[in-house]
Image (tube, rainbow, N blue to C red):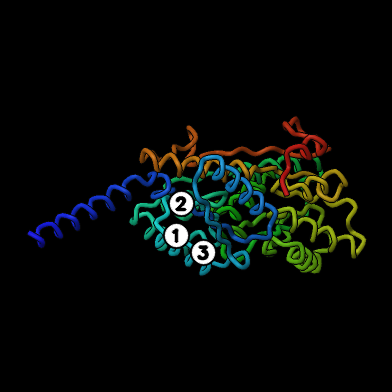
Amino acid sequence: MTKIRTRTALATGFVTVVLALSAVPVSAQDKVIVGLITKTNTNPFFVKMREGAEAKAKEMGVELRSFAGKVDGDNQTQVEAVESLIAAGAKGILITPSDSRAIVPTIEKARKAGLLVIALDTPLEPATAADATFATDNFKAGELIGQWAKATLGDKAAGAKIALLDLNKNQISVDVARDQGFLKGFGIDLADPKKTGDEKDARIVGNDVTQGAEEGGRKAMETLLQKDPGVNVVYTINEPAAAGAYQALKAVGKEKGVLIVSVDGGCPGVKNVKSGVIGATSMQFPLLMASKGVEAITEYAKSGKKPAATPGLDFFNTGVELITDKPAGGLPSTSSDEGLKKCWG
């Protein structure tokens, strides 16, 4: 009898423990983890992206875990971040890939583990390696500044000397799209639209890489000026590179009469439009990309529903807007004063 009572007490105690555990709120047991992996944590674009993700995660009651590469192009750190999120049981990952091809095998592992993967700003290659892409239409962003530069030059566009300041040698999708969009907008025939630097138009002085940084822009501009001091149009992958290009031009007294165009829409870049350093830039909206991404992963965790692309596109378009104080060619544009009200960084 004593043994029977002892077993009964143990069983009752076990049931009590189970009931106590089951009484813990589901939200506390299964809080949704969302990962954000950016190229770096210093570029204002990615800083604003993180801010947008943090605010939306707090609003929706999910946990955000943020990671970033040490420098632009740092694929290995991003690989390690994805693996960490898989191990943590994250429901999804938002990523701006540093190398849109090299990261794909690791992304495949995440998706096989049941995570929703959304590329932000920079599509994977192939784009279908992610469940969705939330981005600026980067080709359109480049095309707008190309059209603006051509319209601004008018008849002089036929004799332009163009310097192209790209991102890096990896030719990642966002870099190629902006470069090729610019050239198309300027009226230059593209050889392979998925590749930079293979065009035969005599107006192109050359391409160089900047790593998306001011110092890189300065060095690239110096190199291309040595190749042809008559450069009068400068395309840049982003606004920090544009600021560096301007410094190189100013150092040799060539800043006047040279059109510099760019893409980003950061507050420093829009201020450079206002001051005349940059003629025109295409503004994108990183905060919206990130906040919409957090919403999508949260919805996926609840219902299993995946986000849809914008009709007619293979990605979710977060918009682009031409910012300039010198409207040209009937192109819809926004002034720098208005741009400063919605810029980031």
Residue 219 location, quadrant: bottom right
Q: Left of 101 or right of it: where is 140? A: right
Specify the amino acid type for callout 3: Gln
Distance Cα–Cα, label 1 vs label 2? 8 Å
Q: Is residue 52 visible?
A: yes
x and y, in percent, of residue 58 in the image: 56, 44
Specify the amino acid type for callout 2: Ile
Query: Is 99 placed above or below 134 here?
Result: below
Query: Is 87 placed above or below 132 here?
Result: below
Give the residue number, with chain letter if any, for mark 3.
Answer: 78
Distance Cα–Cα, label 3 vs label 2? 17 Å
Residue beneath the point at 75% across and 30% down:
330
Nearer to me, 123 or 171: 123
Specify the amino acid type for callout 1: Leu
Residue beneath the point at 48% across and 67% down:
80
Dots 1 and 2: beta carbons under 8 Å?
Answer: yes
Q: Secondary structure at mark 1?
A: helix
Q: How many marks?
A: 3
Give the residue number, with chain letter if any, for mark 1.
Answer: 85
**Numbered label attached to residue 33:** 2
x and y, in percent, of residue 92 in the image: 44, 50
